Amino acid sequence: MWQKEFETMDRADLRALQSRRLRETIEKVYENVAPYRAKMIEAGVRPEHIKSIDDLKLLPFTSKKDLRDNYPYGMFAVPLSEVVRVHATSGTTGKQTVVGYTRDDLAVWGDVMARTFCAGGVTKEDIGHISYGYGLFTGGLGAHGGSERIGCTTVPVSTGNTKRQIQILQDFGCTFICCTPSYALIIAETMAEMGVDPSSLKLKVGFFGAEPWTESMRRDIENKLRIETRDIYGLSEMIGPGVSFECSEHCGLHINEDHFIPEIIDPETGETLPEGERGELVFTCITKQAMPLIRYRTRDITRIHYEKCGCGRTLARMEKTVGRSDDMLIIRGVNVFPSQIETVLLSFAEVAPYYQIIVDRVNNSDKLEVQVELAENSFPDSVTELEAIRGNIGRSIESAIGISAKVTLAEPRSLPRFEGKSKRVIDKRVLY
Ligand code: DLL
């Protein structure tokens, strides 16, 4: 274990630590983050009302909307001069959700990722192949920080060019890999096409996350790549990857509770649910300096178990998430909100506000198609004109969401109309 004293802490001691850190955090945000102060005043809560983690439920929730309303830095609790890094993830409209880190926050991130890798048997003798994207996405640099923190030789490959990735795995003797589970399957298939025998590699274990995957996908990856696998979960708003991690027992993901306090709520009513019930996961950061979020609604649906694990860790375990309480899609590891696509479509006078978003998975790769109706009065009279509109919409969608989409222009009045709630997203992916 990387930090045994925290990972196996007696639960009563952990609770005391969490309560102390929560009190300090609440005092700090009340003082330094105007939107929090305003929300707490509105809810009639003062920092002195928060004595232990039992008082968490008195505090108002935070959501992506708060981050959007205070874009880009309005939720920061320290001056920008203390912030050494920012990352960003998709917002629900045109603007990104921005998160910040102080130097201490980066150190904590390194530690929680080091815990993750240690739980998969990684030591400083290992060589890490990081194929999560580097950049605003937290996957690449987050995994990178943890790998370096342990002292592993770290290979910052980032995404793309699968054949080159395989060449690097072979030549550099990488012993662990980090990427999305669907990309792991693409690597496996490409290896088969190239005639590379996975047993000839030094690869031992893979850390896969950033999107949902199933136990049968796990078996498939393990068989095809001849490695062990670990699920890793996180979200940019908390820190990135490293919020929770799997150990060799494979019985849920240990939440780094000394940094993030989890709660499960009913997504409809906001009520805290009793231990063991399934609902929406909510987190409170209790050590983040730059941007501590209080009762942040992740929208991920899961259940938490608090019994001690066979591995000796006392940190609570969350089950694999079983969906979301909002309409966010994860396409090729990228978070996409249908509203982002709608915003783009509505900016084109040539199309009507009737569209469908179709997501499918072909050969382990997600495909996105956007069908949109042409406006009745602007039916273009040449194929060239039609193609130009299609091309412009495609480019605008790609620049808004960061991934490409096949755009299909439909005839006026040809797409379904809905009397009740419209169903604009058709997700055909079946996670086997
Ligand atoms: O996906 C951080 C990350 C990077 C996690 C690399 C793991 C590995 P965001 O882009 O902010 O951050 O997306 C967060 O992705 O709320 C979940 O819905 C989903 N997600 C992340 N990990 C898992 C997982 C990163 N292991 C959102 N299983 C979260 C299922 C996951 N869903």
Image (spheres, grey):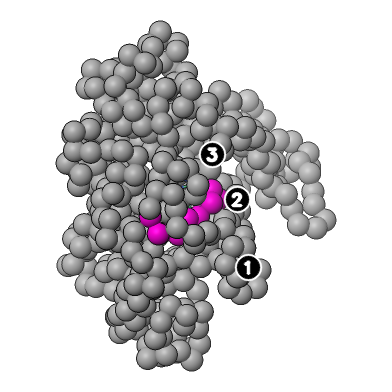
State the mark number for residue 266: 1
Instruction: Name the secondary structure under disc 3.
Output: loop
Relative depth, front residue between 251 and 224: 251
* Horizontal side of residue 165 vs 320, given as left or right: left
Density class for disc 1 (Cα within 10 Å; few <14, some 14-19, many ≥20) is: some
What residue span does the magenta drawing correspond to? 313-321
Main secondary structure along the magenta-highlighted residues: loop
Q: Earlier in the sequence, mark 2 or mark 3?
A: 3
Q: Residue at x 57, y 67 (%)?
A: 275
Q: Residue 392: x and y, percent?
A: 51, 37
Work out which residue is located at the far right of the displayed protein and give it.
Answer: 419
State the mark number for residue 323: 2
Q: What amino acid is labelled 1 in the image?
A: Asp
Magenta-span inclusion, residue 340: no
Give the alpha-carbon distance from disc 1 to disc 2, as whole Å: 14 Å
Q: Give the quadrant of residue 177.
A: top left
Residue that badge 3 annotates: 213
Q: Residue at x 58, y 73 (%)?
A: 272
Q: What amino acid is labelled 2 in the image?
A: Gly
Question: Is the residue marked 3 within 8 Å of ligand 1, measured from its CB?
Answer: yes
Q: Residue 248: x and y, percent?
A: 41, 41
Instruction: Name the secondary structure under disc 1.
Output: loop
Q: Residue 238: x and y, percent?
A: 38, 60
Q: Residue at x 34, y 72 (%)?
A: 13
